[in-house]
Image (cartoon, helix red, strand yellow):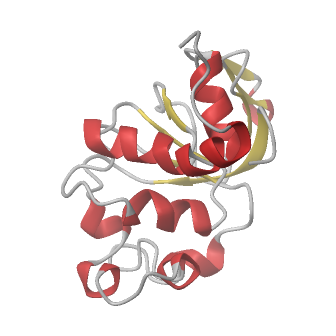
Amino acid sequence: MRGKLLKGKVHKLGDNINTDYIISGRYKFKTLDNVELAKHLLEDIHPNFYQKVSPGDFIVAGENFGCGSSREQAPLAIKYAGIGAVLAKSFARLFYRNAINVGLPIIISNTDRIKENDTILVDLAKGNISIPEQGINLSIEPFPPEILKIIEAGGLVEYFKKYGGWPLSL
């Protein structure tokens, strides 16, 4: 992860984007290569989506993002496609946890005012989304410091490699 301040272009989706839309079952069981999985991100609902994404871009969606199966391939495909974060009104509980586990920032926010192709700035530590083109600032719940450290490390496995376990204060 690049840090606590993220900047990128918006790719807007709707409600109920399930994990099979994120990465089709025809790929998630054929390879363990996350880079290869990323090349098929959202292709059943947005062909060539992967080719349209630049590093740091955002997926912005409505309600219930990540519903469906609880496999980690969905947040991993998003992360390895270079997406900086996913913003949605709500997330499926298991997707939310899996995203944190793999180091993918996910942000609960009202996404109605965020438009396709907007460039946005997200401050994970301060809890702010800025849409400069519209002059809009949205407040979000900042990540707790412990979760932010997991995300910054690149996920739970990388956190353990870096720190050797959990601090006793958790």
Which image quadrant is residue 141 in? top right
Residue 80 image offset from top left, x and y in percent: 60, 68
Asked if residue 39 lies left or right of residue 117, the reply is: left
Q: Up-down: is 99 above or below 132?
A: below
Q: Say whether residue 158 is left or right of residue 39.
A: right
Figure quadrant of residue 130: top right
For image coordinates 46% across by 32% down, the residue present is 112
Q: How many marks?
A: 0
Q: Taking 134 as reference, is 70 above or below it?
A: below
- Choose between 120 and 4: the one closer to the eye: 4
Residue drawn at x 61%, y 43% is: 160
Q: Residue at x 47, y 44 (%)?
A: 101
In the picture, residue 139 is in which quadrant? top right
Residue 126 percent coordinates (x, y): 73, 15
* Residue 66 point in image, percent of width and height: 31, 50
Q: Is residue 49 visible?
A: yes
Instruction: Examine the rendered structure and indicate whether residue 127 appears above or below residue 55.
Output: above
Residue 44 position within the rendered picture, expressed as x and y whole percent measured from the top left? 33, 79
Please give left or right for residue 112 compared with residue 67 in the image.
right
Q: Is residue 119 visible?
A: no
**Residue furthest to the left:** 68
Which residue occupies 40% across, 87% down?
A: 31
